[in-house]
Image (cartoon, rainbow, N blue to C red):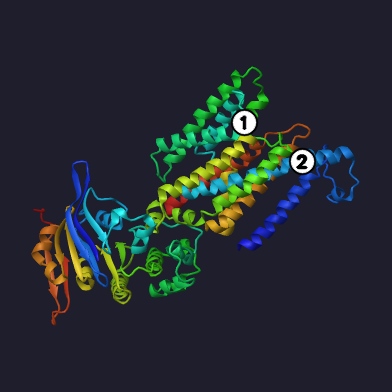
Amino acid sequence: MRLLPFVVLMSAVIALTAGTALTLTPDGRPEPLLALFSGNLPPIERELLWQLRLPRQLLAFTAGALLAAAGGAIQARFKNPLAEPGLIGISGGAALSAALALQCGLPTPWVPLAAFGGGLAALGLTSLMSRPGTDGDRLILAGIAVNAIFGSLLTILIATLPDGSLRTITFWLMGSFANADWPQAERFVIAAPILLWLLFREWRLLNALQLGAATAFHLGFDVRRGGARVVLLAALATALVVSHCGMVGFVGLMAPHLARQLVGSHARRLQIAAPLLGGWLALLADWLAHSLIYPAELPVGVITSLAGAPFFLWLLWQSNRRRRHA
Amino acid sequence: MLEARRLTLRRGERALIDDLSLTAACGELTLIVGPNGAGKSTLLSLLSGLTPPTSGDLRLAGRDVRTLSARDLARLRAVVEQEPGWQPGFNAAELVMMGGYLQGGSRNGWREAMRLMQCDALAKRQLETLSGGERQRVHLARALWQLMSSGESQRFWLLDEPTAALDFGLADALLAEVRALAQTLRLGVVAVVHDLNLAWRHADQILLMESGRGAAFGPPGEIMQKDRLEALYGVRLAELISHDEQLRAFVPLAEPRTRD
């Protein structure tokens, strides 16, 4: 599919999803979309819409887009279709670090920075364990180990909190957009386009890296420095999301893959298509999390993992099949 | 001119490339031959600047490779590896265009590179639908476009076993094309090949390698001596010469001898 029809189609799908989710009444009945514009909404509903649902949707969409762009970039950097910010440890490190920062009473604006540091530290550990620059499956294995370590430490940390409630644990481990407010949404609406643009600008390098590090070098790219830049940007995007929304797994894996099936591997198209798909997936997952067992709410990561884990297995099966046929 | 002087690459105690010197001129086809494990691909990796030598001197167009950035190096040489990487979801034209990413060059120049490599009909095909040989040609066009768009006067095309995925007719045709391109575009081509007869037929110069060292270097007529090749490959050879003495071929015979 060409990029322009894809963007038009995706925009329509996103608008439809957002519109439906926006107008979902508290008892789960969808309100007709037109009521939104007719001015007939009761004040409480209007308040709900503008102060809760809209910032929540903006947060979900931009967070999903950032995770997808980071996933696409990481997959190209390590020439590994199974890589994603969560699987190679960035998310785990970022979550632990953010929780630590919160516990130490760091002011809120510093939490994303702490998450960023934690994400990078985890990534450094993963690379160290899998030898730097390797393309293969070792990176994933090392990432799983690092994630397990950070996940356990996070659970210990939360369990030792004086009011360590189950809610906080699930927020960090399974992710949620339920705490969204306007200041958060504004931060994302400003930061996301900048990060997405910076990642998009690397499309030539991302294309070259998909041929392998040696070929990228032969084409004239400084692989070490360029690769580090891409990973830093991906870590920054992931850390931003994790520090505000917890670990929303698998969006960074699923969205770039679906995008690749639809618009091909060219990074100039992929880094536009994947964020659109990622944003939509997060929006959809959040809506399902919000409405499936209404009035209770599921953590959004439960939905993304429920869809993402089988997707991951399917990818593994596909790559095995390809290897057998090669 | 590509000038390698006393190149050595050590890994621990072992010398993978040992005190090897080589010069390759623009407009000429220099072929590297030798038995498996002689260090041919390692040498090409050194010449490409990917692997830095332990000692020795390497100059491309008079410039010391150690002082060149990846980008500057890419203007002077393009490389096609033995098994060049590729990814499903790209078409052939998109792969070829990557050759010009950092160089600029004319907007549609990549088409000319594809035409010269006779793969322009494949431009819109997805890489996963191409055969190994077709994909090899697309990679050759990608590297050719890198050189065509560079604007340097001396440029080098380094190819690691470009004929590996081809049947013997196609392999012969490809080397003839590469040599013709070397002459018309004034490219210095250094390529690794396995087939002695192809090397004999197409090379301007041959480097014969043995255990990381240069066993002999010069024009094919001087290098391709039956006794020398028998000793190098550890196999008895029959030498066939056509009536007009224009063509020569070596045929390996059974019962390999032990190498001395």
Image position, residue B68 (x, y; %): 33, 56
Residue at the far bottom in the pictured view: B244
Q: Which amino acid does label 2 sit on?
A: Arg
Dot 1 surroundings within 10 Å: few (below 14), some, or many (20 or more)?
Answer: many
Q: What residue type is labelled 1?
A: Trp
Q: Is residue A287 visible?
A: no
Instruction: Give the quadrant of residue A23.
Output: top right
How far apart are the two marked residues, 2 and 1, measured between alpha carbons?
21 Å
From the viewer's perspective, is A108 left or right of B164? right
* Closer-to-camera residue (A219/A310): A219
Question: In the figure, residue B74 lies in which quadrant?
Answer: bottom left
Q: Which chain carries label 2?
A: A
Circle 1: element type: helix
Q: Mark 1 lies on which chain?
A: A
- Total marks drawn? 2
Residue at position x 61%, y 34% from top?
A243
Query: Which residue does the image show at 18% across and 58% down from the upper left?
Result: B21
Residue beneath disc 1? A172
Residue A53 marker: 2
The residue located at (43%, 38%) in the rendering is A127
Give the answer, above or below, for where B215 lies relative to B189.
Answer: above
Query: Is B49 positioned to the left or the right of A301 in the image?
Result: left
- Dot 2: within a 10 Å radius of its alpha carbon, few (fewer than 14), some, or many (20 or more) residues? many
Q: x, y percentage for residue A91?
A: 55, 36
Q: Which of B246 and B42 is in front in this view?
A: B42
Residue occupying the far top of the picture: A162
Is A194 or B218 nearer to us in this picture? A194
> Badges 2 and 1: C-beta atoms under 8 Å apart?
no
Q: Say which residue appears at 25% left-offset and 66% top-offset.
A: B1
